[in-house]
Amino acid sequence: METLRLVLRYAHLVGFALLLGGAVAQYLSGRLRINLAMLYGAGIQIVTGLALAAPIRPEGQEPNPVKLGVKLVITLMIGAMVFFSRRREAVNRGHFLAIIALTLVNAAIATFWR
């Protein structure tokens, strides 16, 4: 089970890298669009995050349910923002920056909230 959890964590980090990397690349190019890397990254983050929240860890290592709830809400917001904007020719600058900010906030919660 530990190997499965580590593989899921690795996939979760790959999803984060795709989402943030795709967003930063689009932002630096000056063309604010939702690209495939962002779409796949958000999807990977949702699926692996839900799988990581499942009870497949040793006794005594239960995560904080409030933390998981906050991360789920933020992740679903990111997923909705990316999914429903994927076909637009251009995305509003504030909308695009919100995707980047929420992605970074979600990573900060995972890192600093114990």
Image (cartoon, rainbow, N blue to C red):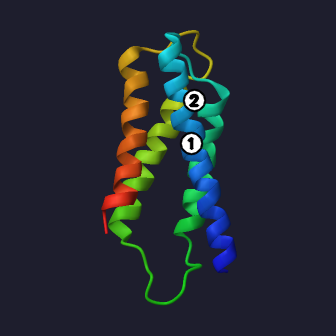
The answer to whether 104 is drawn above or below residue 28 in the figure is below
Q: Residue at 43% across / 88% down in the picture? A: 60
Image-quadrant location for residue 18: top right
Residue 100 in the figure: left or right of residue 43: left
Residue at image x 58%, y 9%? 89
Q: Position of residue 44 (x, y in %)?
A: 63, 48
Percent position of residue 105, x then y = 35, 45
Q: Position of residue 1 (x, y in %)?
A: 67, 80
Residue nearer the viewer, 88 or 32 = 32
Tell me the element at label 2.
Answer: helix
Q: Report which quarter residue 36 is drawn in.
A: top right
Quadrant in which the C terminus is drawn: bottom left
Residue at (33, 65) in percent of width and height: 66
User: Label 1 crowding class (10 Å Cα cut-off): few <14, some 14-19, many 20+?
Assistant: some
Label total for image: 2
Residue drawn where x is 39% and y is 42% of the image = 104
Q: Is residue 49 above or below residue 37?
A: below
Secondary element under disc 1, as helix, strand or loop, is helix
Q: Which residue is mark 2?
A: 22
- Nearest the camera: 17 or 52? 17
Instruction: Inspect the image, locate mark 2, and give the three-letter code of the amino acid beneath it.
Output: Gly
Query: Mark 1 near mark 2, Cβ–Cβ under 8 Å?
Result: no
Return the residue found at the far bottom: 59
Identify residue type, mark 1: Ala
Q: Earlier in the sequence, mark 1 or mark 2?
A: 1
The residue under label 1 is 17
